[in-house]
Image (cartoon, rainbow, N blue to C red):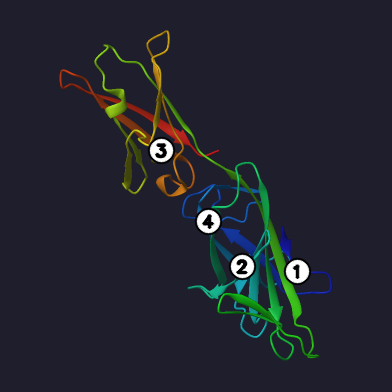
Amino acid sequence: MTGSLVGCVSPGGSLASTTGPSAGVWSTADPQIVHVGERVRFSFVLTASLNAEQGIEPSGIVDYCFVRIGQDLLETGIGEFGHFEVEHVFDALPPGQEVTVTATGYRMLGSRDRRLIAGEWITRTDFDQTDRVICQDDLTLTAYKSRIELPVQPDSDDWDIAGGGLALIRRDGRTTVVRASQNGEDGFEVRGPFDDGKYMVTYEPSAEMLNSSGTTQVRFTVMDDRGRQHVIERLLSTP
């Protein structure tokens, strides 16, 4: 939802994030999804009018910008292209929960109303004029958590399933290899064998192991007692 508040003829404002449908591309789509634990960047751009798409410089129009994510208030900085930017890690958001992200641009009238000092928000208590809200935009994020459920059908009874390696391979080639969980440590779980001889390898990857959109390649490699290597591959989709 892009726009300016009632009483603000211009400018408008547009809030975008990096957790949209295309990897590495700012998205103003509303709503969006975010993986639990994902680090997301937000950018708030001033526009010349309510429905304009071209960004404008905030200098002389908006002095500062806050981004509120649920109950968290964040101070923004000025990014490479003169936009207000901030990032946030969604590590406290359970799967299925929605959160509203709101960016608000202010014009100072006298001294600034609120500042973040040594990690604490300090609100001005004198009788100076209240800073003016110039423009605002928001979007809704819904949290999700990926889960790998990989069926494994051995062709003999000597496959070392628990000794296998589960690799998650991102587009840029970065790879995370996960081993079976031991003593409560992070790792994949193995269930089976079932009546049909299959096993099920399950794992819940963290956000940094995955592509933020599209698919991530999953490769399970296992050896048997005769030294043969077996590889099973799947694609894990982003919802």
State the CA–CA distance, disc 3 to disc 2.
Answer: 42 Å
Q: Name the residue tied to disc 2.
A: 44
Q: Position of residue 163 (x, y in %)?
A: 27, 28
State the CA–CA distance, disc 2 to disc 4.
Answer: 12 Å
State the CA–CA distance, disc 1 to disc 4.
Answer: 22 Å
- Secondary structure beneath disc 4? loop
Position of residue 20 relative to residue 45, above or below, is: above
Q: Position of residue 128 (x, y in %)?
A: 78, 90
Depth check: give the residue in front, 36 or 104. Answer: 36
User: Which marked residue is nearer to the observer: mark 1 or mark 4?
Assistant: 4
State the CA–CA distance, disc 1 to disc 3.
Answer: 51 Å
Q: Name the residue tied to disc 4.
A: 18
Q: Name the residue tied to disc 1.
A: 4
Position of residue 196 relative to residue 124, above or below, is: above
User: Which amino acid type corresponds to the residue marked 3 in the rendered image?
Assistant: Gly
- Secondary structure beneath disc 3? loop
- Secondary structure beneath disc 2? strand
Question: Are dots 1 and 2 in contact, CB under 8 Å?
Answer: no
Label 3 packing within 10 angstroms: few (<14), some (14-19), many (20+): few
- Secondary structure beneath disc 1? loop
Mark 3 or mark 2: whose residue is earlier in sequence: 2
Quadrant of the image occupied by residue 226: top left
Query: In the displayed image of the protein, which residue is found farthest to the right?
Result: 7
Q: Name the residue tied to disc 3.
A: 184
